[in-house]
Amino acid sequence: MKRTSFRRAIVPGVAVIALAAGLSACGAGNEDSGSSSDSGLSGTLTGEGSSAQEAAQTAWRAGFQGENSGVTVNYTPSGSGAGREKFIAGAVDFAGSDSYLKDDDEATELSDAKERCGGEDPVEVPAYVSPIAVVYNLPGVDTLNLSAETIGKIFNEKITTWNDPAIKQENPDADLPSTKITPVHRSDESGTTENFTDYLEKASDGGWPHEKDKLWPLKSGEAAQGTSGVIQAVKEGEGSIGYADESQVGDLQVASIKVGEEYVAPSAEAAAKVLAVSPRAETATDVSMAIDVDRTTTESGAYPLLLASYLIACQHYDDQATADLVKGYLTYVISEEGQQTAADNAGSAPLDAELADEANGIVSQISAK
Amino acid sequence: MSTTIATRDKAPRRRGDVIFAGIARGAGIAILVALAGVALFLTLEGFPALGASGAALDGAANFLDYVWPLVFGTLLAAILALLIATPLAIGVALVIAFYTPRRISGVVGYMIDLLAAVPSVVYGLWGIAFLGPQLKPLYQWLEEYLGFLPFFAGPASSTGRTILTASIVLAIMVLPIITAISREIFTQTPQLHMEAAMALGATRWEMIKLSVFPYARSGMVSATMLGLGRALGETMAVAMVLSASGVVTFNLISSTNPSTIAANIALNFPEATGLKVNALIASGLVLFVITFAVNFAARAIVARTERERS
């Protein structure tokens, strides 16, 4: 009796194991047949970093793996800081980061990255450029024009109702209600917040008295986790205003910001235009395209409230296979095709032709030691 | 003949005993090692943050200034959650144990247990998308009519993502723990005690007051403490629901709320580097110590009431 029950228990177990073994054999078989790829590239490439790049990385990975069937690309969107840290530690082949590498009193990331890359300057190329939209929830007000100064005062809680004279002056035709304004910010550290506060600091003429920061500097206001959290909070709260990656705004109302004398709505082209005219950062080298975004540009049709996210890699890798993979992947990402894929899937702004050419020149130099 | 059988029987059993004792002992030691490992890691990694100041601590002057608002938020959210959950859970447990026919009580008990199986992310989503918006009118009402109390000073949140909402979500999450343990203890009340109370002419409520509660008091305390432990450490639901600004305030209905240690770690760890990571880990150590103290206190209370009874 005991025996039968034991057998009854073990038979399905064995069957499951056999089935699993069979399936994994199938899987392995498929991989084997795929390794004879068209481009000759094969192996696994690992990257980590910016969560803003997540949607774009997914699209790039699919596109790159489609062209090179023997390649597996892994990208962990655990955040820019984590990505840079892992890259410096040598745990990943490349990093995605919302800010370029620099040395300051908090950390010596640039020097550390240099050390990781055998004493050579690390490669930094802009790969993902996305406008940040100012979203709001105000039924009946379909267009809203705001200057950086007004946005700064709203987020600094100095302008507290929608019918404030400052807003009225910029929107003479809008029927503004007396609803209380609820500014919504990110409760987690994020590159979006860093770029938004950088824009406010530089462009708001004192309307925003704080310095740029990854973490919201005010200890008040509505806070929400992640881009989706901000979108959700703005959607729920009438009279609220927030900032989020333009690709994620959905059907929320979007404000136009004042550039020069006109008001510009966020768009991929308008963001790409700003990047093209922005000066390089102090840390920029022959292989690093670190850019200080020109937040105060008056160029017609430009939208200076944007996030530029970089890919960080080394010029030389220890082994040929990794070097080829990094070079292949980064080349694809920067290519017209890669940038268009990201634009279609993640709503980013494709790089300007000139910047793409320069980035391509840098990436094509990546090789083995 | 019989002796040979006896020894033959005995030998394998002894081997089994040895193996079983070894496994059991190993499991016990493994837990201690894991706990010591966690404590050691938190202490070593958190230590550098104790001397830090400024940017790594989000602008706080020293670590104590940094962690205090978080401790406050953690305790406030957890205590509010318990204030809501404990009476509710004990009520539910009483209903299951004494007030419903066995068949129905089984179903209700099963439903409550099911609440424990819902992942906290789902509670978070529910809190943001459903509960928060539903509570908005309540918060506006509280601000208007009870605004003279510091708890409801407002301004009322326009999204409903307040510490009170987070506490209600937490309350629902700890409800199954407190209910399950209380129910177990209620059903263990000696039949004789209950019958004696009934025989004295007690109503059902008086019977519960006279025989069940005194018997179950230590169990109820430890159930509540376990619930408190869960509420203190809950991360995801709070991180999602709470609009946290890191302030110290008793205002429960505005969008400016204190954050909790666990939620603060979850929100800031992904982008943290260098000393900031140490600061987050050190705040984790503080949470570890608090939960440890809570459990220790629960044990002490249980032990004392048991001593008193015997």
Image (cartoon, coloured by chain):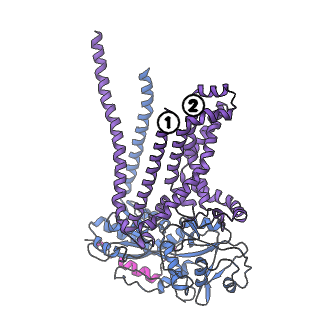
Residue pushed farthest front? B308
Q: CA distance from mark 2 to mark 1?
A: 17 Å
Mark 2 — on which chain does it sit? B
Q: Viewer-proximal residue, B33 or B107?
A: B33
Q: At label 1, which amino acid type do we have?
A: Glu
Disc number placed over residue B189 in the picture, else none: 2
**Circle 1 is placed at which residue position?**
B308
Could one spot residue B157 in this view of the protein? Answer: yes
Q: Is residue B79 above or below residue A353?
A: above
- Disc 2 vs disc 1: which is toward the camera? 1
What range is drawn magenta here?
A: A347-369
Q: Chain of mark 1?
A: B
- Check disc 2 and give the amino acid type: Thr
Q: Nearer the viewer, residue B62 or A102?
A: B62
Residue B160 in picture, x, y percent from top left: 64, 62
The answer to whether residue B139 is left or right of residue A75 is right
Visual hue assigned to chain B: purple
Same-chain check, marks 2 and 1:
yes
In the rendered view, tell whether residue A334 sits above or below residue B107: below
